[in-house]
Amino acid sequence: MAFTVSTEPRKNRQLAVIIEVSQDQVDKELRKAAAKVAGQYRIPGFRKGKAPYHIVVQQFGLSNLYSEFVDDLGQQLFRDAIEQEKIEPYAQSSLEDIQLEPLVYKLVVPLEPEVKLGDYTAMRVEEDPIEVDEAEVERRLEMYRDEYAGWREVDRPSQYGDLLSADVRSVIIAEAGEEGAAETVVLDEADWDVTLDEENPLEPAGLDRELLDMRAGEEKDFVLSWPADGQSIYAGKQAQFHVKINSVQSYEKPPLDDALAQLVGPDYTTLEDLKQSVRESLLEDESKRAQGRYLDKVLDALVETSALDYPPAVIEDQLDAMMQDMDQRLRQFGLDGMNALLRQTKQTEDQYREQMRPEAIKIAERNLVISEVIKQEAIEATQEEIEQRVKQMVSADENGEISESSAELAEMLRYGAGRNMIVSQVLTDKAISLLQALARGEEPPSFTTESDAETLVSTETEAAEPLTAEVDDATEVAGDSEVAGDSEVAEDAK
């Protein structure tokens, strides 16, 4: 196929590829398109397929004939051009422009990132001290007090917030002229449970106040009335009450003492035992967080001292991976994936992507330096390491045996895309271990021995996995250009 190719370097590791098709080739394509159209449509005065070329052009227009072949031709020309020029695209290319006379395609090709690492062997990063906040220890102890709080009988006068158990009887007082009539009983309860709540008083008004300051075993008689303009069926009436308090209970937290420690668990004899356990737990948690913060500092320091040049597709791929990961996580909770999140936050997908972009840039740049460390250090994964990681992911038992229910998943992880993911994780972990050791000024770990040299997995095409939870296959090289929509462009260029 006759064409010429020229290239123009663009910033951010992109290359403009300009493909100009010879006029002879264009004429051939136009005539083939005309023959195809003539065979599909009846042109007045001619049998199908017999109309001459110039008549078909008059009837259908030259731009419509271009649209018959310009898409497919562009795809083929791009494949031929990158092979001819030995261009290795990093990701899918995009059509930037097309003109028809002469027929010229201009595409933008993202190229592989270039990473020039800083001197990571001499890089030193200080670790933050790991300390336990005593205020957090006290907060944890208060949580135990809340957990074991409950209603306890108290030997004191009742007060607001207490739970009373009482025998109560109240009867409407007969008015003049009602003597001898059957009595009206308002309340007649044994072991009536009532909580004294200052914000939600009992009816009739004043009943709470009468129950206040009473001890268990005390009895009391009193009269209360309902307002004449109230909504009660006893509006304007008075009632005689007789109350006997059976118990007074207060909702209390247990004191911070040895008894509380023994409530928490049989391993604790004294309160100091419990405090020490809380401190150790907090120290372990803080150590894990400190490890994460230290890794962030090491990778950020390496990124800062390195020279990175990469196409925008790197960030877009990372954003795609993060969006997909978020979608999957939300669906695990029974939600409608990203659609639910976007509705909740009242954002469009583009707005959410822009919100995530700073984090995507950080993750992508860290991945790039990790990948380059893997290449420069020739880090590899052994079959034993791959199998060990597989067993971890399928939760093998303590003897390393994989259950029948997990056997199929284990096989998926051992081959194809699953294996690539496992290898990527192993390589990334090794690179991180190396960088952290160097940053601390320690002897770097040795990853290979003579005994496992034959089991090494080649890493020439392996890339470090993103530091997010998702599996990122978005960095695979895409050789074909996306030129869909060329027909519309051809029409605009008419």
Image (cartoon, rainbow, N blue to C red):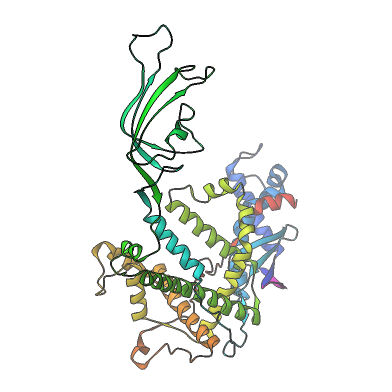
Quarter containing the N terminus: bottom right
Task: Note whether residue 329 is visible.
Answer: yes
In the image, is 59 to the left or to the right of 437?
right
Q: Start and end of the magenta stretch?
A: 5-13
Image location of residue 253, percent across then percent down: 40, 55
Q: Nearer the viewer, residue 72 or 200?
A: 200
Q: Nearer the viewer, residue 229 or 409?
A: 229
Image location of residue 54, percent across then percent down: 71, 48
Task: Note whether residue 463 is visible.
Answer: no
Image location of residue 241, percent across then percent down: 39, 26
Which residue occupies 53% across, 51% down? Answer: 338
In the image, is 438 to the left or to the right of 257?
right
In the image, is 312 to the left or to the right of 401?
right
**Picture layout, residue 114 above or below residue 210:** below
Which residue occupies 38% across, 56% down? Answer: 147
In the image, is 251 to the left or to the right of 189?
right
Magenta span includes 273: no
Which residue occupies 26% across, 70% down? Answer: 397
Instruction: Tell me the quarter of the picture where residue 72 sits.
Output: bottom right
Instruction: Tell me the quarter of the picture where residue 121 sits.
Output: bottom right
